[in-house]
Image (cartoon, helix red, strand yellow):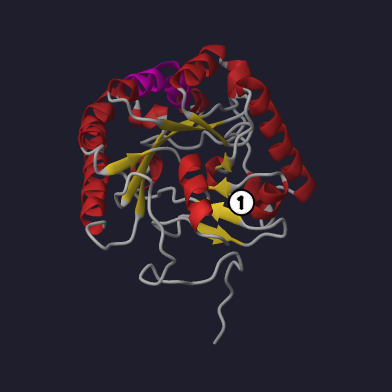
Amino acid sequence: MRLPDSGRYAYRPITDRPAFAWPHGGGLAAYVAVNVECFAYGGGGATLTPGMDPPNSEHRRYGWRDYGIRVGLWRILDELAARDLPAAFLLNAWVPELYPPVAEALRASGGEIVGHGRTNSELQGGMAEDEERTLIEESTALLTAAFGTRPAGWMSPGATQSANTPDLLAEAGYTYTLDWPIDDQPVWLSTRGGPLLNVPYPLETNDYPQVLSRGHTGREFADIAHDHLTEMLTQVGPARTPLVYALSLHPFTAGQPHRLHALRRVLDLLAERRDDIWLTTPGAIAEHYAAQVTA
């Protein structure tokens, strides 16, 4: 029997992988991803809030997300800075022009900028190839102009892909993607433009699906993220294979006071165990892994 598969990567169990090591000598690399996004009023993308919305309530869906870039982001930036935790910003390319203070704050933070489309109101999944190529090219050019360095990595808006997305990313010069939640280690993907590295990016330790799709409270999400990190620290004991822990935050979700209050203990654990964890960014993970394990 032959089941269709993506054709992008081969099956290989985590017990049978090439040897590699993180630069700090420990077995766990960790990064925090902050999704910095913009939305069109009435233009799609802002389709869910944590509860049922009454009819004619686009202002509620849009406003709940706008809260993130007005309020929640600034709280998250403060929490990361207070603990000296590096961050990767999954950034819609129209944000710097629409919200200049946000771009200034991201520059000042020194965090990595990851390509994330133009806006989360347009998703790549249903795009024609030429249309999607233009989206990637325009997003890359805008982020490069805003920050002086072109992004190395890409996370598709809404985690959607077309059949061409990995090919187009590799052809556009991207070296890694965060789109495939397939592993706790980086995995090489095959594309017509050459190998593209997939760096682990979470569904389980991602506030958006946990809160909006699965209905977890902020405290439940914090418990999940805390337990996930604690168990990974156990899994990477002596002679164990190296892993990647990723925490994905959306300012309109994690930046709400009650969720941020619960989330602090996860950030505290990352900071407290910094001697055991390589606190880094997905770009640094991709670069370090690619130097040791070739496609």
In the rendered image of this protein, does residue 195 appear above or below residue 262?
below
In the rendered image of this protein, does residue 139 appear above or below residue 215?
above
Which SS does the magenta portion mostly show? helix
**Image x and y of residue 278, in percent:** 34, 42
In magenta stretch: residue 58 = no
**Residue extending furthest toward the right:** 130
Q: Residue at x 59, y 19 (%)?
A: 96
* Quadrant (top left, top right, bottom left, bottom right) of the N terminus: bottom right
Residue type at the position of mark 1: Gln
Between 21 and 265, the residue placed more toward the observer is 21
Q: Residue at x 46, y 71 (%)?
A: 12
- Left or right: residue 5 versus residue 239 is right
**Image x and y of residue 233, in percent:** 23, 51
Label 1: element kind: loop
Q: Which residue is mark 1?
A: 161
**Image x and y of residue 212, in percent:** 38, 41
Q: Where is residue 269, by image quadrant?
A: top left
**Image x and y of residue 51, in percent:** 36, 36
Q: Which portion, as a residue range, is magenta?
A: 64-78
